[in-house]
Image (cartoon, helix red, strand yellow):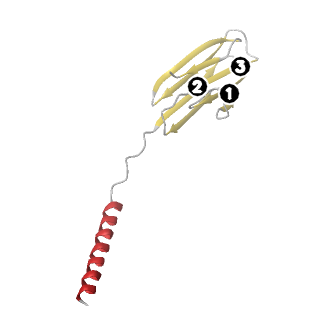
Amino acid sequence: MGTRTGRAAGALLGASVVLVGAVACSSAPPPPPARQYTVSFSVTGTGGGASFGRYVTVGELGSNEQVNFTGLPYEMTLTVPYAPSPKLQAGSVGVPPGSRLSCRIQVDGQTVAAQTITVPGQDVICRAP
């Protein structure tokens, strides 16, 4: 009987060590939050008419992840948990010759791409490096 009691005590001691270890692991501090990036898109223009465009935070314009917009001025600010590779394209129709169209992309408050064009003509395109 002494051997059974010794084995039972040993098993109980082993179980309590496992429980103490499990409690110690569960009280570890959570990992730090993931890095967040703030991406701002803006398009402005002169001359009225109809304006339209699209943007992506990462990927290529024309992908199924792009977001389309209409009307100026246009501004959108997003927070993303990954290093962005933003792109923006905008155009205008029905505007007087010599009108201006501008785009700008900022990441964490820093301008990473900007362009101004005279319309009618090609679309304005901003691409972050």
Asked if residue 113 lies left or right of residue 15, the reply is: right
Q: Nearer the viewer, residue 67 or 93?
A: 67
Specify the farthest residue to the right.
94
- Disc with the residue nearer the chain's start (2 vs 1): 1
Q: Quadrant of the N terminus?
A: bottom left
Q: Amino acid at mark 1?
A: Gly
Q: In this rendering, is residue 105 above or below 99?
A: below
Q: In this rendering, is residue 95 above or below 21?
A: above
CA gap between label 3 and label 1 equals: 18 Å
| Mark 1 crowdedness (10 Å alpha carbons): few <14, some 14-19, many ≥20 | few
What residue does disc 2 label?
Answer: 87
Where is residue 88, by image quadrant?
A: top right
User: Looking at the picture, how far across and down is residue 105, in whole percent?
Assistant: 53, 25
User: Looking at the picture, how far across and down is residue 41, in whole percent?
Assistant: 56, 28
- Disc with the residue nearer the chain's start (3 vs 1): 1
Secondary element under disc 1, as helix, strand or loop, is: loop
Asked if residue 55 lies left or right of residue 36, the reply is: right
Q: Nearer the viewer, residue 93 or 32?
A: 32
Q: Amino acid at mark 2?
A: Lys
Residue lying at 45% horizontally and 39% vertically, measured from the top left: 36
Residue lying at 32% horizontally and 68% vertically, measured from the top left: 18
Secondary element under disc 3, as helix, strand or loop, is: strand
What residue does disc 3 label?
Answer: 92
* Label placed on residue 62: 1
| Mark 2 crowdedness (10 Å alpha carbons): few <14, some 14-19, many ≥20 | many
Q: In this rendering, is residue 4 above or below 88?
A: below
